[in-house]
Each structure stands twice: as C-alpha cells, then as structure tokens.
Amino acid sequence: MTPDDLVLTGYGLRFQGVTYPCTIGRSGVSGKKREGDGATPRGIHRLVGMLYRPDRMARPTDWALPIGLNDLWSDDAKHEDYNMMVRAPYPHSHERLRRADPLYDLVILTDWNWPYAVKGRGSAIFIHQHRRPGYPTEGCIALARAHLRRIAPRITFGTRLIIR
C-alpha cells in the first residue's frame, strides 16, 4: 500500500494522507459481488480510466476522456458487451453515462470484472459524485463533488483502489 492508493477505511476513502467521507453500496462490502446486489466488491482494484462531462467541467487530467451524448455502459449480463462502454442506440440493458444529474460528471473507472467480464459477477464499479452525503450507491464509491475533483488530477496509473 502506498500514499497514492485510494484505501476504503471505516472513516472514508484515504488518499495521500487525507481521509474523505464517502458512501459505498447499500449492501456494504462483499467478497462475493453479484449483478444487482448493491455491494461494493472487496479487493485491490486498478484504476483503468477517467471520464468527464466537458460541458460541465474542465478536463481534470490529460488522460481523462469526455463523455459523449451517446455514451452508455452495458449492464446486460446476457450480452457480449456486458460491463463495457457502448454507444446509443443500444437495445440491451444499460446505464446512461451522460446523465441529467451531476452523478457522473466525473467518473473514475476501476477494473472490477473488466476487461473480460464474468457474466453475473457485477458490472462496473465507479468512483463518482454522491447524490447527497450518506446516500448509498449500487456498489460504487461516491464522494462529494469537491473531494472527487481534488482527487482526480492527483491519480496516477499506479494508483489502486483498496477495499478490505
């Protein structure tokens, strides 16, 4: 573990010596994550990308990619694109990345069940903005907007998300 790792503790998400309040999945942390269970998966996860809304914020780091109008995330465990970013029109179950609310204005992608997804093991675990303090996620980790924007430009390709 290094100071550049994001470490989920009982007090929040620790990064570079600061602990930020955060929320996790409504079902808590689990070692047996399944699609739709609302759990945050235990483990050491690599950070594999960052997405942002260019109409709402400046690019947080030079490797962040803009979220386009038609960008979606497949959560259809029966389809070959399961747990992958796809584009509309997409007839299978998915989540829209370009949302009306600010939840996905900035998204840090983890390697949970990616790039070779095991069907039913659960789709993407993102680090994103919370709805409000204390409001649980579907399994992701959520932070206050200001905290997420503070962390994002300091992440490197060696940064990991550690969930015990």
Image (spheres, grey):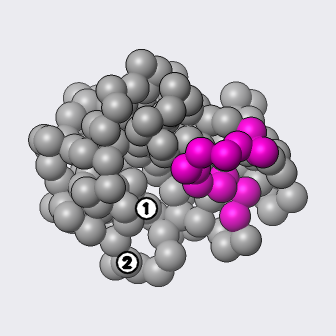
Q: Is residue 97 magenta?
A: yes
Q: Magenta segment, which residues?
A: 87-99
Q: Which residue is mark 1?
A: 142
Q: Residue drawn 46% across and 21% down?
A: 115
Q: Are marks 2 and 1 in contact (CB under 8 Å)?
A: yes
| Three-letter amino acid code at the position of disc 2 | Tyr
- Residue 131 is situated, as x and y percent measured from the top left of the image, at 50, 76
CA gap, disc 2 and disc 1: 9 Å
What mark, if any, has residue 123 been given in the picture? Answer: none
The residue shown at (22%, 44%) is: 33
In front of the other: 91 or 31: 91
Closer to the camera in the image, 132 or 60: 132
Q: Earlier in the sequence, mark 2 or mark 1?
A: 2
| Residue located beneath label 2 in the image | 135
The location of residue 123, given as percent across then percent down, is: 41, 42
Kind of residue at disc 1: Ala
Q: Height in image: 129 above or below 63?
A: below
The quarter of the picture where the C terminus appears is top left
Q: Is residue 48 visible?
A: yes
Secondary-structure class at tag 2: loop
State the quadrant of the N terminus: top left
